[in-house]
Amino acid sequence: MKKIQSMVHNIFISTGFGTMIFVTMLILDNGLNETLKSVLIWVVASCLYGLTFEIMRVRALRSRIKFPLHIALCFLITVAARVTYSYITKGYVDLISTVIITIPIFAAVYIALYFFMKFTGSIEAYR
């Protein structure tokens, strides 16, 4: 099991580094067009998602609070990224519609993430 965890961890890390390098190269080669603006928004959001995992390491917080706080922060980051994208592409933001569309997608991803972490034992590591 540790080998699979290590392999999955390495895939995610290398995907993150590769994305950062590739997006930077695309911006340098092609300029900051509409597609790259959206990619850049999500790269920044992904970095912020990664930072929210540091909540799991804060000893001053109770274990029962850490995961819900992490989820809430990630939801706020997701909504902020979608609002930013909407404003850049359309020039306006429909916040209610954005939140309503985001909730089920976000919930599905977090349910899948929860079971993945439970299966690989990652949840136990943060307790």
Image (cartoon, helix red, strand yellow):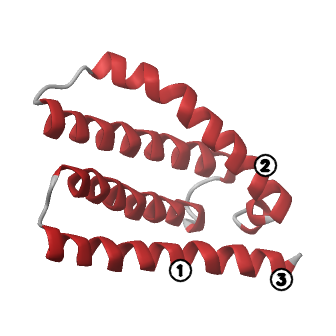
The one nearer the camera, 11 or 26, is: 26
Q: Picture coordinates of residue 77 (x, y %)?
A: 37, 46
In the image, is residue 49 above or below residue 79?
A: below
Mark found first going from the N terminus, 3 or 2: 3
**Mark 1: secondary structure:** helix
| Gap between marks 3 and 2 measured at Cα | 18 Å
The image's mark for residue 3 is: 3
In this rendering, which labeled residue sits more in front, label 1 or label 2?
1
The image's mark for residue 54 is: none
Which residue lies under the disc numbered 2? 115
**Residue drawn 35% across the image and 17% down it:** 97
Mark found first going from the N terminus, 3 or 1: 3
- Please name the amino acid that badge 2 sits on: Phe
**Residue drawn 84% across the image and 80% down it:** 2
Q: Picture coordinates of residue 112 (x, y %)?
A: 71, 45
The one nearer the camera, 18 or 66, is: 18
In the image, is residue 45 above or below residue 6?
A: above
Tell which residue pokes out farthest to the right in this image: 1
**Mark 3: secondary structure:** helix
- Please name the amino acid that badge 1 sits on: Ser
> Which image quarter holds the N terminus?
bottom right
Which residue lies under the disc numbered 1? 14
The one nearer the camera, 29 or 17, is: 29
Q: Picture coordinates of residue 114 (x, y %)?
A: 72, 48
Mark found first going from the N terminus, 1 or 2: 1
> Which image quarter holds the C terminus?
bottom right
**Residue drawn 49% across the image and 40% down it:** 72
- Please name the amino acid that badge 3 sits on: Lys
**Residue drawn 54% across the image and 65% down it:** 58
In the picture, measured across the screen, residue 32 lies left or right of residue 42, that is left
Do labels 1 and 2 touch, CB within 8 Å? no
